[in-house]
Image: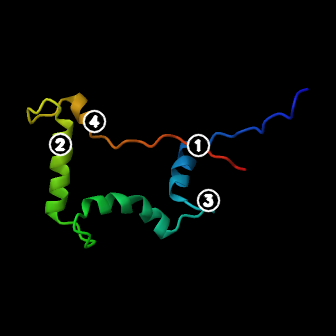
Amino acid sequence: MIGPAPPETSDLSREELRFFRYDRNRDRLITRNEMLSSRTDAFRKLDKDGNNLLTFEEWAVATVNRFEKADSDKNERLTPREFAATAPKSSPKKASCGC
């Protein structure tokens, strides 16, 4: 016995995917808070003293740490391969269920 056919899925366009990364509640509207929330975590990681101000020192320490982590041979120069390691990591695509 063959069951019902699975529902057809529609591929979202690249722009729709980008839009939905911000539209957290999927109401097809992006609020200011939704737009800013994607950057809040990154800012908090840099703001080490938690005062909601990012000093040059906090930014510089993060940048130096990022460079040192990428400089795998510790020669204080980044090859193209080492530099590629500094690119932001993309999050894995999650299958969304419209259940």
Q: Do the residues labelled 3 and 4 touch (CB within 8 Å)?
A: no
Question: What amino acid type is highlighted by mark number 1?
Answer: Ser
The local secondary structure at tag 3 comes to: loop
Q: Which of 48 and 6 is in front in this view?
A: 48
Q: What distance separates the C-alpha of mark 4 from that of mark 2?
A: 10 Å
Considering only order in the chain, which callout, 4 or 1, is on the residue closer to the N terminus? 1
- How many neighbours does mark 4 have within 10 angstroms: few (below 14), some (14-19), or many (20 or more)? some
The CA span between labels 2 and 3 is 37 Å
Circle 4 — which element? Answer: loop
Residue 34 in the figure: left or right of residue 11: left
SS type, badge 2 = helix
Amino acid on which the number 2 mark rests in the picture: Phe
37 to the left or right of 6? left
- Quarter-of-image position of residue 36: bottom left
How far apart in space, not on screen, are marks 3 and 1 (Cα)?
16 Å
Check disc 1 and report its element: helix, strand or loop. loop
- The residue where tag 1 is placed is 13
Q: Residue at x 17, y 32 (%)?
A: 72
Query: Which residue is denoted by mark 2 in the rendering?
Result: 67
Disc 1 or disc 4, which is closer to the eye?
Answer: 4
Where does label 3 land, which residue? 26
Q: Distance between the residues labelled 3 and 4?
A: 32 Å
Counting residues from the start of the chain, the first of labels 2 and 1 encountered is 1
Compared with 68, 25 (above or below) is below
Assess whether mark 2 and mark 4 are in contact (beta carbons under 8 angstroms): no
Which residue, as the protein is rendered here, is positioned at the far right?
1
Q: Which residue lies furthest to the top in this view?
A: 1
| Res. 97 mark | none
Task: Give the residue pinned by disc 4.
Answer: 85
In x, y percent, where is residue 81? 24, 28
Kind of residue at badge 3: Arg
